[in-house]
Amino acid sequence: ETGVTQSPTHLIKTRGQQVTLRCSSQSGHNTVSWYQQALGQGPQFIFQYYREEENGRGNFPPRFSGLQFPNYSSELNVNALELDDSALYLCASSNSGGALETQYFGPGTRLLVL
Amino acid sequence: GENVEQHPSTLSVQEGDSAVIKCTYSDSASNYFPWYKQELGKRPQLIIDIRSNVGEKKDQRIAVTLNKTAKHFSLHITETQPEDSAVYFCASYRGSTLGRLYFGRGTQLTVWP
């Protein structure tokens, strides 16, 4: 098992609500990437945080936002939830700002939007 | 941007047989190719990876091959066991100022006893 943890494990929300997901990176890792995995699909890159700054973003709207804290843990915030936001949200930690590096995944947060 | 295609989407084999999963990528600058195994309800787990300066890498029953010219890479599992049953994802990575993984759509491998 990796040292990456996420909370909560499961979450049910209704359309229009807001949600915050949390990720603690593996010890010694300073980079956190967030991915959305819809049912039956591969993970899709949302954004990456390196040393508390957003270090790139995938094709997701601005209502997906994030933070990274001085201890390198991270939050993913999603505003104005839509039904299509239902998915497994994975964070992955690594120890560089984008150089060749292995990413270790957390167990994910399964979000259901009703 | 990068596009990773993965085939087949499902694969059924008898225990003891070999399984091969293939991926292609589009960005010639991609230089790192990991494979993840995801069991039902669990996190993607890195099982093997290969860098662009290497053509083949083996770890016990698992091997990965890379053809940079053709831009494809493959996962080979020999002597399959029922516990190999899972979804396998290939991914590509271009090390730069943004190190994101691009994933294939996954292959559901079922190993029958």
Image: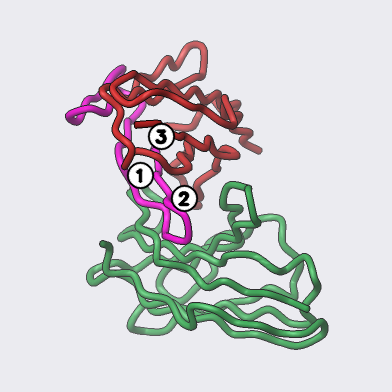
Q: Which residue lies furthest to the bottom in this view?
A: A17
The chain coloured green in the image: A
Q: Residue at coordinates 42% horizontally, 84% vertically from top-left?
A: A69
Q: How crowded is mark 3: few (under 14 residues within 10 Å), some or many (20 or more)?
A: many
The residue depicted at 81 percent of the width and 82 percent of the height is: A15
Residue A83 x %, y %: 80, 71
Labelled disc at residue B33: 3
The kind of residue tagged 2 is Gly
Label 2–label 1 contact, CB within 8 A: yes
Nearer to me, B12 or B49: B12
The C terminus of chain A: image quadrant: bottom right
Within the image, what quadrant is residue B86 found in?
top left
- Per the rendered image, the range of residues in magenta is B33-62
Q: Is residue B85 left or right of residue A112?
A: left
Which quadrant holds the N terminus of chain A? bottom left
Tell me if I can see residue B93 in this picture. Answer: no
Q: Is the magenta stretch mostly helix, strand or loop?
A: strand
Read off the residue under disc 2. Answer: B99
Circles 3 and 1 on the same subunit: no
Residue occupying the point 32% across, 26% down: B15
- Return the residue nearer the eye: A43 or B67: A43
- Output the chain of dot 3: B
Identified by mark 3, the residue type is Phe
Q: Considering the numbered disc 1 on the image, is that residue within a helix, a strand or a loop? A: loop
